[in-house]
């Protein structure tokens, strides 16, 4: 059974370092660092934790992005593994702020990570003057070292204070929110185009309060790179998944892809193209206290724009003419 070429190995190892890097920080680096408290080097962790206390609000105040980290060469290996690309349909003016709906969630959100948290696909050249931020679960920013790693890539907390800060300090900010959330991860199986969106209206209300434009996006291929084992809602495994989400904020999904060798099963995703289409921005008025009717109006306009975006590009990116985008 033939295995991958050297370049494929580099891409595969680069891909694995992304999730494994977080695990290494959490289970190896942090315990070792805390262990220093009981050695002659106790001053190092003490100074860090004092600084952490003083820096606690930074994730809710724009974060601390690093152009150096966003331009690491390792991200290009991840890009080329699938490959991942970004395609704009309209320019985004730096004179406005934007809330971008990221669809679908997928299992590991490869497209959004590579396109908006790194410069591997050339975001800054594609959208000059725009600063991207991708929102994620707030509790990640309470974990030492992981918070620094996330902020360096331009990731921000999905908390309301963090969102309000970004949309009220300057212009040219693009805030990406995975609207379907972790619940959409359980919908992530190949050949499905189901989004959790009908009752998710908070991002529209926030956009109205700040006068931010809404930007629909759809990432073709995001749900095609892994197979997932789905469990019946009455099964013990599904109940465990729900319990896991209650504790950690996201689902424990059972999925598989390919191994290092051809036709083998493993945890590497399949080599399938991932293309993020960034749609035309939808202008919104600034309304400090939008009514439910106004929120519903612009939420409907957003869903229509997203549906049209999918319809315009679906055939080109592997779906049949009869495939429909479904909203739950």
Image (cartoon, rainbow, N blue to C red):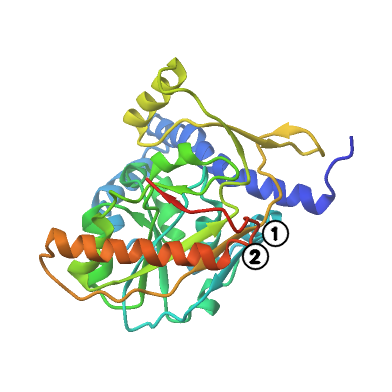
Identify residue for label 1: 80
Which numbered dot is residue 316?
Answer: 2
Q: Residue at x 46, y 71 (%)?
A: 279
Provide residue 299's location: percent of width, then percent of height. 28, 61
User: Above or below — where is 46 with respect to 156?
Assistant: above
Does the residue at mark 1 contact the one at mark 2 (Cβ under 8 Å)?
no
Give the quarter of the figure containing the C terminus. Answer: top left
Depth check: 13 or 183 in front? 183
Residue 65 visible (yes or no): no
Depth check: 28 or 195 in front? 195
Q: Picture quarter containing residue 264?
A: top right
Provide residue 272's location: percent of width, then percent of height. 69, 52
Q: Residue at x 48, y 69 (%)?
A: 278
Q: Nearer the viewer, mark 1 or mark 2?
A: 2
Label 2 environment density (alpha carbons within 10 Å; few <14, some 14–19, many ≥20): few
Give the quarter of the figure containing the N terminus. Answer: top right
SS class of the residue under badge 2? Answer: loop
Q: Residue at x 40, y 18 (%)?
A: 234
Provide residue 84's location: percent of width, then percent of height. 63, 60
Marks 1 and 2 sit apart, C-alpha to C-alpha, by 20 Å
Q: Can you name the residue that lies furthest to the top here?
A: 236
Depth check: 296 or 60 in front? 296
Q: Can you name the residue that lies furthest to the front here?
A: 322
Which numbered dot is residue 29?
Answer: none
Depth check: 48 or 312 in front? 312
Task: State left or right for residue 109 relative to residue 281.
Answer: right
User: Above or below — where is 294 with respect to 160?
Assistant: below
Task: State left or right for residue 279 relative to residue 58.
Answer: right
Q: Of label 1 and label 2, which has the lower sequence position?
A: 1
Provide residue 93's location: percent of width, then percent of height. 39, 83
Residue 3 visible (yes or no): yes
SS class of the residue under badge 1? Answer: helix
């Amino acid at each position: 059974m033939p295995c991958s070429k050297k370049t494929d190995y580099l891409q595969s190892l680069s891909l694995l370092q992304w999730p494994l890097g977080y695990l290494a920080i959490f289970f190896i680096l942090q315990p070792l660092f805390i262990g220093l408290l009981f050695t002659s080097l106790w001053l190092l962790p003490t100074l860090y934790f004092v600084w952490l206390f003083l820096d606690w609000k930074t994730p809710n105040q724009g974060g601390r992005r690093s152009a150096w980290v966003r331009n690491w060469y390792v991200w290009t290996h991840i890009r080329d593994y699938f490959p991942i690309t970004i395609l704009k349909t309209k320019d985004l003016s730096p004179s406005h702020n934007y809330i971008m709906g990221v669809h679908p969630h997928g299992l590991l959100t490869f497209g959004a990570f590579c396109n908006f948290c790194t410069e591997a696909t050339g975001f800054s050249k594609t959208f000059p003057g725009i600063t991207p931020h991708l929102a994620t679960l707030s509790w990640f920013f309470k974990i030492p070292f992981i918070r620094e790693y996330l902020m360096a890539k331009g990731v921000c907390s999905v908390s309301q204070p963090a969102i309000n800060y970004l949309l009220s300090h300057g212009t040219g900010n693009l805030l990406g929110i995975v609207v379907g959330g972790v619940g959409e991860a359980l919908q992530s199986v190949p050949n499905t185009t189901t989004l959790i969106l009908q009752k998710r209206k908070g991002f529209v209300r926030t956009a109205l309060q700040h006068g931010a434009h809404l930007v629909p996006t759809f990432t073709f291929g995001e749900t095609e790179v892994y197979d997932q084992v789905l469990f019946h809602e009455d099964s013990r495994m599904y109940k465990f998944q729900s319990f896991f989400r209650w504790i950690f904020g996201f689902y424990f999904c059972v999925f598989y892809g390919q191994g290092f060798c051809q036709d083998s099963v493993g945890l590497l995703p399949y080599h399938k193209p991932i293309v993020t289409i960034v749609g035309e921005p939808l202008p919104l008025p600034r309304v400090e206290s939008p009514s439910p009717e106004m929120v519903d109006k612009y939420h409907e306009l957003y869903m229509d724009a997203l549906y049209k975006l999918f319809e315009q590009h679906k055939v080109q990116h592997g779906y049949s003419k009869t495939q429909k985008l479904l909203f739950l």
